[in-house]
Image (cartoon, rainbow, N blue to C red):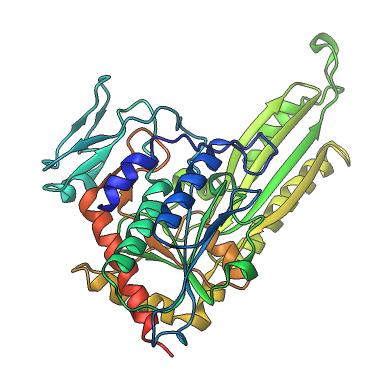
């Protein structure tokens, strides 16, 4: 069975995580997929378990002669993003895609002019949703690729060192590693299989913080407001204007960081704002947090202490600091990608990844591509051929580490 065939089954299971649930996992549907994967692994003769928080752990013992190789791990998440519905996914398979506009049954069109990468998919088997939901390639493609690689490993009797596998819940709401037991996982090194095109290797990501600001206004009747009213909504706008416009997401790219206003609500008397703060450079990142503090101070200096209250905390850091001592992970992945006839591309992640948090938890963990594009929306897509190559990358990495002693 090819990876895309597994994938077509997995995406039909709704695993859309819910950031408001307060439970772990955040949605019971994640258990449905976890138990299906457990059953498939058991059919392969692999011992697997799903814990009470929906983390699936499995271990493949080394073949004879490879017992001293380091334990290498592969990790993907089972949930899909809350940004777009994951219920009732109906995947469409377009063989020998021509590289042009993609039409959906309901009239939606993914235009090649808007998405130039489509041209390079010409001749491949394109897989999309029906345009009413996301597809789920993020990250059921990674799940399917790992499962397919394991099956091939066992069926073809390929020599290998010890391998650890984990499928996790709730990555899309930032909770994928909250209850990840690194010691139980048992790997010395690992890769998340959760990236974009199959030629990509990611080992840099943003440093990240979240900021919540509460603004206290003075509400009075507008007819007698002069010199008395402090409109919390106006103050929120003023505070936002104190942050550099060039540091907004829509004005940045590559390794450039940003202040992203995620939410604002309120009334004359009170308002709330939520930001995320991002930058690849740790020194610049710390300076941006100081800018946020300075903006809040300026508001309080003008309107009185306590007008604006800031709560800010770090979320994760750039994994490169933890990958640098283990660059063999990157070089091995590059060689594996090259072995598939592809040119490796190093991509700085403009976001976060479970691999970043895992790296800081003691498990160095760069990220491999899956062959997917346009994640988190109705234009999400992937090709069967790129999934095949992703399986090849995983197998080549397993082979490389199986030879290490």
Task: Report x, y in % for residue 164.
Answer: 49, 68
Task: Identify whether 203 is placed above or below 145.
Answer: below
Rendered-image quadrant of the C terminus? bottom left
96 sits left or right of 46 in the view: left
Task: Report x, y in % for residue 341.
Answer: 18, 69
Using the rendered view, name the quadrant where residue 398 is placed.
bottom left
365 sits left or right of 309 in the view: left
Q: Is residue 358 visible?
A: yes
Task: Identify whether 120 is placed above or below 104.
Answer: below
Task: Identify whether 353 is placed above or below 81.
Answer: below
Count of residue discs: 0
Q: Residue at x 83, y 42 (%)?
A: 300
Task: Report x, y in % for residue 275.
Answer: 64, 43
Q: Residue at x 32, y 68 (%)?
A: 153
Q: Nearer the viewer, residue 285 or 190?
A: 190
28 sits left or right of 79 in the view: right
Instruction: Name the residue furthest top.
Output: 223
Q: Residue at x 53, y 36 (%)?
A: 29
Q: Nearer the viewer, residue 388 or 330?
A: 388
Task: Identify whether 236 is placed above or below 75.
Answer: above
Task: Report x, y in % for residue 203.
Answer: 46, 68
């Amino acid at each position: 069975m090819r990876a895309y065939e597994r994938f077509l089954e997995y995406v039909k299971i709704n695993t859309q995580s819910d950031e408001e649930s307060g439970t772990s996992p955040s949605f019971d549907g994640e258990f449905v997929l976890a138990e299906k994967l457990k059953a498939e692994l058991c059919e392969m003769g692999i011992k697997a378990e799903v814990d009470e928080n929906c983390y699936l752990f499995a271990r493949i013992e080394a073949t004879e002669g490879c017992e001293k190789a380091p334990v290498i791990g592969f990790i993907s998440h089972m949930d899909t993003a809350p940004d777009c519905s994951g219920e009732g996914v109906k995947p469409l398979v377009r063989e020998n895609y021509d590289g042009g506009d993609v039409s959906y049954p309901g009239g939606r069109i993914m235009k090649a002019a808007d998405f130039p990468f489509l041209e390079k998919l010409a001749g491949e088997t394109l897989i999309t949703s029906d345009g009413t939901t996301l597809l789920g390639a993020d990250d059921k493609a990674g799940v399917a690729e790992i499962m397919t690689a394991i099956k091939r490993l066992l069926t073809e009797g390929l020599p290998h060192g010890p391998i650890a596998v984990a499928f996790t819940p709730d990555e899309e709401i930032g909770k994928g590693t909250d209850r990840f037991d690194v010691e139980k996982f048992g790997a010395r090194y690992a890769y998340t299989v959760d990236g974009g095109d199959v030629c990509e290797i990611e080992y840099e990501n943003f440093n990240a913080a979240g900021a919540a600001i509460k603004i206290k206004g003075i509400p009075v009747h507008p007819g007698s407001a002069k010199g008395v009213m402090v409109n919390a909504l106006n103050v929120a706008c003023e505070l936002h204007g104190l942050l550099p416009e060039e540091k907004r997401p829509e004005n940045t790219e590559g390794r450039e960081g940003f202040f992203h206003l995620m939410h604002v609500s309120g009334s004359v008397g009170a308002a709330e704002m939520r930001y995320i703060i991002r930058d690849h450079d740790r020194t610049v990142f710390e300076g941006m947090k100081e800018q946020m503090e300075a903006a809040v101070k300026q508001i309080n200096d003008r309107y009185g202490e306590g007008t604006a209250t800031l709560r800010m905390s770090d979320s994760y850091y750039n994994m490169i600091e933890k990958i640098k001592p283990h660059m063999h992970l990157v070089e091995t992945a590059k060689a594996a990608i090259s072995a598939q006839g592809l040119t490796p591309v190093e991509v700085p992640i403009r976001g976060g990844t479970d691999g970043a948090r895992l790296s800081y938890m003691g498990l160095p963990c760069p990220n491999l591509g899956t062959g997917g594009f346009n994640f988190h929306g109705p234009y999400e897509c992937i090709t069967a051929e790129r999934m095949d190559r992703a399986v090849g990358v995983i197998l080549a990495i397993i082979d490389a580490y199986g030879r290490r002693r």
